[in-house]
Image (spheres, coloured by chain):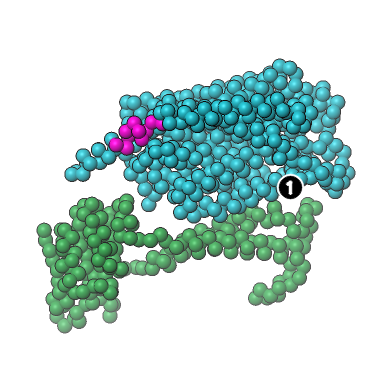
Chain colours: A cyan, B green
């Protein structure tokens, strides 16, 4: 073909260092993120007694909530990487490296879970996970104790920590495997290495599904150990998709604004990332959230409905409806069309919006406490009346400082990775198809 | 390069048959690249009733032809919304209201207490609202796509043309219809020949069944 040399030249210029390496350009942002992160965590920990909450419960729950947000970002990115290899997707080659680098945070994210190990070591884990001290639970909440004691074979501290080690181990292994493999393909263009990634994507998807589901059971559902929902793992997966795809979009847009990935990531890629965010992060989330709600609402079994009741007492309905509108209806209408997905500025606004509401989703999952005396209530209205003034605590400054703190550390680590590695899989056999990709 | 252009005076059928009406002109190209360039030129020349036919989807052809996005999503969105509304009204009327409305005959709602839930229980209605939204959106999408494309259409003048048969194999065609306001007999053929096709041919309307 006569135009081949020209295409070769343009490909070389697309893959030039200035377009595919962040280098030291992220240095100031990275330093700022680290400083903000340290200050945020320091403020949260030191000022926690002033912010209220007894015995550090608020601090621990706030930490858990923001930890889950940054964890879900990494897991969502890992899911994206796995699914691209699983489907042999060509279009996504140019956006896969940022996803791999975000996912590779899973190799160190266990560090952010260590505070709960400290709590366990000092015998304080029961403050947020009531099953951790059954004697205490029997004294203070006999109604829940009767249910939880039957789950002790699963909900006990040794097994909890064994599982946590397994989850973090599996995630670190998967993230590392896909990043290393991709770096190898980027260096050598080896089709064998590419095929190996595809081959292991299937088992990786199964491992991913099992570990995220059980992690959601362990770290969120067991906050209210009397309650259960078999859909909860899928709910957490949907939340991972929301934050993960949003983070990939934000990362690509910011890299392009700093002059990288020019000509490699186009409106076509943004449209497809937007479709994924719309499909999984908005519609699928709403589908799962509603399905879980409807089954429990319909069956109307007290040990199940308590969890939702806690979220409709006092001021909590405001946040429940904020999720309905902010996490589903408004972004559904906003992102349903083709054109906002193709405009990076609008799409990145949608992505930031979705991360904000996913943050609120985790707040809504982690913070409420099911009233202890629910088992003895005689009628619904008396419960509603008794808990009429339940605050949500959303405006407590600890949530801001904690978000800045853990978010800053996460951002610092992510920028670190973006600076260290090439931003695109340079010699991927499918790179040319990805650059030329069109939706129609 | 074989070029075959028939003029209206030549277009006489078997002895005694009336001359057939001209459907349009086709230009045959050997590569997608040549077709793409030709499409740019035809668009710039201001033709409106024309099309490109290819054996496989050619990326960027829509842009070269200047085809705007379809408006199909807009009616489909409102069809979906209609489904949501109908499902809500149907369920709330039948389950929770006891007055009569006239819908071909007089029908009355039948409030019936189910598992102690309020008569107007939105969560119970949502699955049906969701399903009817999907149903109306999907069927209207399918139906309107047919309508907008002028389907079903059981025959087409191009399908009777022997040269055009290679469109399913290895050739790329530009078709300009005779009803285009800019179509001028002879001029349009010359214009197409200037775009570097391997053949240009006039296509006639099919004869009407007697």
Res. A107 in view:
yes
Name above or below for residue B186 compared with residue A238.
below
Q: Is residue A188 inside the magenta stretch?
A: no
The residue under the point 13% across, 76% down is: B10
* Residue drawn at 69 percent across, 19 percent down: A118
| Residue occupying the far top of the picture | A121
Work out whether A3 lies above or below A142. below
Is residue A430 visible from the viewing direction of this image? no
Q: How many marks?
A: 1
Specify start and end residues of the magenta stretch as a single range: A13-22
Image quadrant occupied by the N terminus of chain B: bottom left
| Residue A25, placed above or below residue B208 | above
Query: Taking B9 as reference, is A353 left or right?
Result: right
- The quarter of the displayed image where residue A228 is located: top right
Does residue A149 appear left or right of residue B73 in this picture?
right
Give the position of the C terminus of chain B as an image quadrant: bottom left
Residue A74 is situated, as x and y percent measured from the top left of the image, at 53, 32
| Residue A171 drawn at (x, y percent) | 53, 26
Q: Which residue is mark 1?
A: A317
Q: Secondary structure at mark 1?
A: helix
Dominant secondary-structure state across the stretch colored magenta = helix
The chain to which mark 1 is attached is A
Q: Nearer the viewer, residue A401 or A271?
A: A401
Residue A391's spot in the image, x, y percent? Answer: 77, 41
Residue A32 % position (x, y)? 54, 30
Q: Residues within 10 Å of mark 1 (few under 14, many from 20)?
A: some
At a point 79% along the width and 28% down the height, the residue shown is A54
Q: Is A18 contained in the magenta span?
A: yes
Q: Give the camera-side residue of B93 and A385.
A: A385
């Amino acid at each position: 073909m006569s135009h081949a040399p020209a295409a070769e030249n343009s490909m070389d210029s697309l893959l030039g260092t200035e377009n595919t390496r962040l280098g030291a350009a992220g240095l100031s942002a990275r330093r700022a993120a680290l400083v903000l992160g340290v200050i945020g965590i320091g403020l949260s920990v030191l000022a926690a007694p002033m912010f209220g909450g007894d015995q550090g419960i608020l601090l621990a729950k706030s930490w858990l909530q923001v930890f889950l947000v940054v964890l879900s970002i990494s897991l969502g990115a890992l899911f994206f990487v796995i699914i691209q290899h699983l489907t042999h997707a060509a279009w996504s080659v140019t956006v896969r490296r940022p996803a791999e680098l975000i996912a590779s945070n899973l190799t160190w994210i266990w560090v952010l879970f260590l505070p709960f190990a400290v709590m366990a070591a000092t015998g304080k884990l029961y403050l947020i996970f009531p099953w951790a001290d059954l004697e205490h639970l029997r004294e203070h909440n006999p109604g829940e104790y009767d249910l939880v004691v039957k789950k002790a074979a699963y909900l006990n501290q040794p097994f909890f920590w064994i599982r946590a080690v397994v989850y973090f181990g599996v995630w670190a292994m998967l993230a590392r495997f896909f990043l290393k493999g991709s770096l190898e393909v980027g260096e050598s263009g080896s089709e064998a290495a590419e095929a190996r990634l595809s081959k292991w994507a299937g088992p990786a998807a199964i491992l991913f599904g099992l570990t995220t589901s059980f992690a959601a059971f362990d770290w969120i559902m067991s906050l209210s150990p009397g309650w259960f929902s078999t859909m909860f793992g899928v709910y957490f997966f949907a939340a991972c998709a929301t934050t993960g795809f949003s983070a990939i979009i934000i990362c690509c847009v910011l890299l392009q604004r700093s002059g990288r990935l020019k000509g490699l990531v186009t409106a076509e890629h943004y449209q497809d990332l937007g479709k994924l965010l719309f499909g999984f992060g908005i519609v699928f989330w709403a589908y799962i959230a509603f399905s879980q709600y409807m089954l429990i609402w319909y069956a109307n079994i007290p040990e199940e409905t308590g969890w939702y009741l806690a979220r409709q007492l006092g001021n909590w309905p405001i946040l429940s409806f904020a999720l309905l509108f902010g996490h589903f209806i408004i972004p559904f209408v906003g992102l349903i069309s083709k054109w906002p997905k193709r405009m990076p500025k609008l799409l990145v606004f949608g992505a930031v919006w979705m991360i904000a509401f996913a943050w609120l989703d985790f707040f809504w999952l982690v913070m409420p406490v099911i009233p202890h005396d629910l088992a003895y209530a005689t009628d619904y209205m008396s419960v509603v009346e008794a808990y009429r003034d339940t605050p949500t605590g959303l405006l407590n400054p600890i949530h801001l400082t904690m978000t800045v703190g853990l978010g800053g550390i996460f951002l610092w680590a992510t920028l670190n990775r973006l600076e260290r590695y090439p931003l695109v899989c340079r010699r991927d056999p499918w790179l040319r198809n990805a650059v030329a990709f069109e939706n129609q | 390069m074989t070029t075959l252009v028939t003029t209206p005076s030549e277009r006489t059928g078997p002895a005694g048959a009336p001359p057939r009406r001209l459907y349009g002109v086709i230009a045959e190209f050997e590569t997608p690249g040549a077709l793409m360039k030709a499409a740019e030129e035809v668009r710039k020349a201001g033709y409106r009733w024309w099309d490109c036919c290819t054996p496989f989807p050619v990326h960027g052809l829509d842009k070269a032809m200047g085809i705007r996005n379809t408006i199909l999503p807009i009616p489909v969105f409102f069809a979906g919304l209609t489904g949501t509304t109908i499902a809500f009204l149907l369920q709330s009327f039948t389950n929770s209201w006891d007055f009569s409305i006239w819908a071909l005959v007089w029908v009355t709602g039948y409030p019936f207490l189910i598992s102690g839930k309020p008569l107007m229980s939105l969560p119970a209605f949502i699955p049906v609202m969701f399903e009817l939204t999907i149903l109306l959106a999907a069927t209207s999408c399918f139906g309107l796509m047919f309508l907008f494309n002028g389907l079903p259409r059981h025959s087409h003048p191009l399908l009777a043309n022997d040269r055009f048969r290679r469109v399913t194999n290895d050739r790329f065609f530009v078709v300009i219809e005779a009803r285009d306001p800019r179509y001028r007999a002879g001029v349009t053929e010359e214009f197409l020949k200037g775009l570097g096709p391997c053949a240009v041919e006039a296509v006639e309307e099919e004869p009407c069944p007697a």
